[in-house]
Amino acid sequence: MTRKLEGNGLWESSRMILPQYRERIVRAAAERDAEPEAAVHEDRLEEIAEAVKRSLALGLTVRLELRQEEGHGAEGIVVDASPLQGMLRLRQESGKVRRIAYRHITGASLKEC
Amino acid sequence: MAANRIVMLVDMESFYAGVEKAGNPALRKVPLAVVGDPEVPSSAVLAACPIAKRYDIRTGERLDAALAKCPALTAVRPRMLAYIEVSAQIAGILEAYTDLVEPYSIDEMFADVTGSLHLYGGDPQELARLIQSRIAIETGVRARFGIGGNKVRAKLACDLVAKRTGEGIFFLHKQEDWEQRIWSEPVRRMWGVGGRMEKHLRSLRILTIGDLARTPPDKLQSRWGVNGEVLWRIANGQDDSPVSPWTAREQKEIGTTITLPRAYRLQSEIETVLLDLCTEIGRRARRMRRMGEVVSVGAGGEGGRHESRGFRLRAALPDPSDMTSELFETARRLFREGWDGWPVKRLSLSLSRLGSSEVYQPSLFEDRARQRAIDRVMDEIKDRFGETAIARGRSFTDESRSKDRADKIGGHYK
């Protein structure tokens, strides 16, 4: 109940929005804010592949830098990687496994143990 | 910084009617109403143009009552898609001036110009005039502007003052303005006060917004709880809520509800409708490039002796999905779990725990690639030839509502 008085609660609790309308606005915002795909240098790609491979093989913690829309970064151990499908699975410290697309990765570094 | 915010509430005058007039010059000088279905006398007026309003025609009124007041009234069907497009276009115009734009409804938007105002000369009213003329030129719709130090002040400045001025722009910047222009208004005109609340307030001798503002807040709170405090804050122009643009991340679920034309009793006919809903939700998810992990199904109807029956169940999908066939599989299982034969009048379906759909999990056991291809082809055909251009065989039965739904948005014609 008290949510009405917090944040944007007053306005969110009172409005009626057609879902199709919301989706149209969200889509426009997403298109507008789409980050121009920053090209990742080949050397960097190799670095990423190497770090992912070592994390997978040796169970080392890797820190991945991600594109903005994916929330900048993620840290964990790679538990599965499939360059062909362009995705990997990262077990984060919380135990949660997150799926990440290679094309969202802009950098990777292994954490020193 | 927070002390000197400049927030605008941009309201589109008789929005649906305005869009119709902009698109058809022949309608410009006639009294016009957008009506649910112009063929049906009991159909409701969704919007009346300013000329029609002079005949005292009101939103929500029946078409036959409106025609009695104004026999020359032209009634047209709504075109919801066009309104959504024009509204998005207007949001785009506002976004040229600030990134903080938040639609409040299809015809009202907040824009926080605190950070960008200096780029346009520093005068909020000048900026409002500029945006107003751009909206008029680019969309043909007339916009009104309430400007204030927060969203509540902008909203009330628009509702209570700007809508009545010739220019349609009002900047409420001083506390005296608030007290003079807002407090003198009857409490019924304040945003958030309905007919019933007005009666309750009158019994406490609260007649104007000023009366409400000067009532001790604990008195209102003890009577109406949070809502009492909310009313007091609005009357005093207190509001610290941000103007927060919508983002895909913020959207928690994609959902829909359908009310059936009659009570459906057969499992097969109900499941046909469920498939229609899955088709719709799947398509919407794919358009937004989102996949969901949880499906919820709800049904409502009548049990014996007119008791209402219903359930709402949810389950996680085996893998995040945006695929019609997978949504349907889980939705059907949930439905069969929750339903034991009573007639169904309402069905709802939603997909939640949304994530990006760029990564998907191929499956060893089912042919996901094939199902995705089917969805993709159906989407492409619908994009090119319309929502009814292709459907699953099952949706060509009498009980399917897909044809009817494809023609409508929010229950009104597209």
Image (cartoon, coloured by chain):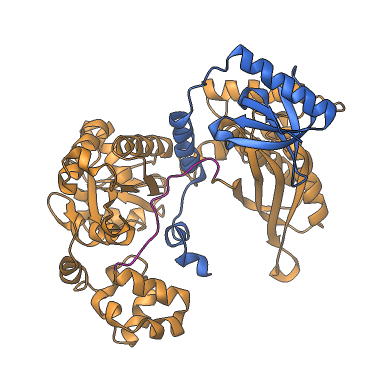
Chain colours: A blue, B orange
In front: B238, or A52?
Answer: A52
Predominant secondary structure, magenta span = loop
- Tell me if residue B143 comes above or below residue B159 in the rendering: above
Left or right placement of residue B302 versus residue B84 in this view: right
Please tell me in which quadrant of the rendered image residue B339 appears: bottom right
> Is residue B137 left or right of B398 when viewed as pictured?
left
Judged from this view, the residue extending furthest toward the top is A42
Q: Position of residue B264 (x, y in %)?
A: 71, 51
* The residue positioned farthest toward the left in the image shown: B166
Q: Is residue B129 above or below residue B379?
A: below
| Image coordinates for residue B302, horizontal then vertical, percent | 70, 63
Q: Image check: A74 left or right of A32?
A: right
The magenta stretch is B237-249
The image shows a total of numbered marks equal to 0
From this view, report whether residue B63 is shown above or below residue B98.
below
Instruction: Pick the residue in front: B194 or B289.
Output: B289
Quarter of the picture containing the C terminus of chain B is: top left
Name of the residue lying farthest toward the front = A113
Most extreme residue toward the right, as rendered? B365
A38 to the left or right of B142: right
Return the x and y of residue B377 as percentages of the image width and height: 64, 20
**Does residue B70 show up?**
no
What residue is at 24 percent from the left and 74 percent from the top?
B186
Give residue B396's position: percent from left, percent from top.
67, 32
The quadrant of the picture occupied by the N terminus of chain B is: bottom left
Say whether residue B125 is magenta. Answer: no
Is residue B115 visible from the viewing direction of this image? yes
> Measuring 69% from the left and 37% from the top, which residue is drawn there?
A75
**Quick one: B294 or B279, which is closer to the camera?**
B294
